[in-house]
Amino acid sequence: MKLVNAEIKSKKELATRLMEGEVFWTQSGAKIYFLEENFQPYDAIPFRFDEIALDGSWEEYPDLQKEVIWYKNIEKPVLCWCNDAEGCDNQKSGALLLVKGYTLKVSSDYPFDTNDNHWKYATPVTQEEASQWVVG
């Protein structure tokens, strides 16, 4: 998972973005999120620091990080393992293809666009994997 600074300017912005569904990570790798489902009234704090209530960690907001989701803005083709099989998301198997776009439509379960087809799942090839096919 690739992380970048979330550029949060205030505690209020952090709370708003968490309630809108964003997830953040601390420098030490703890997950910060908003627990909307299965929230119990006796818990009183829906903001989470890993599995516990987010109490005193609000001061870390300038250093929080967010995940870079590779397929949100595909500017040039990305070499990926593409697959349609259930349970094959994030898998290193299937067809090795260039993903040229991502379109999430309510009616489509196949958002990853290649030259000739659409795929349900796509996982970028790592540099280590790609080096297996480089001659020279």
Image (spheres, helix red, strand yellow):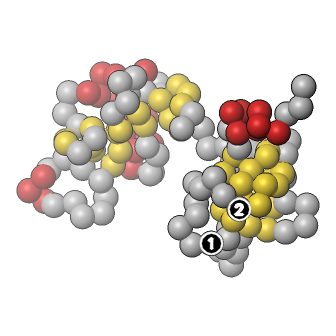
**Residue 128: where, in percent of width, then height?**
68, 33
Drawn side of residue 93 relative to residue 15, left or right: right
**Which mark is drawn over residue 94?**
2
Q: Amino acid at mark 1?
A: Ala
Q: Amino acid at mark 2?
A: Gly
Q: Is residue 63 above or below residue 88?
A: above
Which residue appears at 70% of the width and 74% of the height?
A: 108
Residue situated in front as seen by the camera: 82 or 107: 82
**Around disc 2, counting alpha carbons within 10 Å, would you say few (fewer than 14), some (14 to 19), or many (20 or more)?**
some
Drawn side of residue 131 relative to residue 69, left or right: right
Q: Quadrant of the C terminus?
A: top right
Is residue 75 in view from this perspective? Answer: no
Is residue 126 in view from this perspective? Answer: yes
Mark toward the start of the polypeptide (2 vs 1): 1
Which residue appears at 71% of the width and 33% of the height?
A: 127
Q: Residue furthest left?
A: 42
**Around disc 1, counting alpha carbons within 10 Å, would you say few (fewer than 14), some (14 to 19), or many (20 or more)?**
few
Indicate the quadrant where residue 113 lies: bottom right
Residue situated in front as seen by the camera: 128 or 48: 128
**Residue 58: where, in percent of width, then height?**
29, 28
Q: Is residue 95 above or below residue 73?
A: below
Name the secondary structure under disc 2. Answer: loop
Q: Quadrant of the N terminus?
A: top right
Which residue appears at 78% of the width and 55% of the height?
A: 96
Residue designated by label 1: 85
Name the secondary structure under disc 1. Answer: loop
Question: Circles 2 and 1: CB distance less than 8 Å?
Answer: yes
Tell me how far mark 2 sits from mark 1, CA to CA.
Answer: 9 Å
**Residue 9: where, in percent of width, then height?**
46, 25
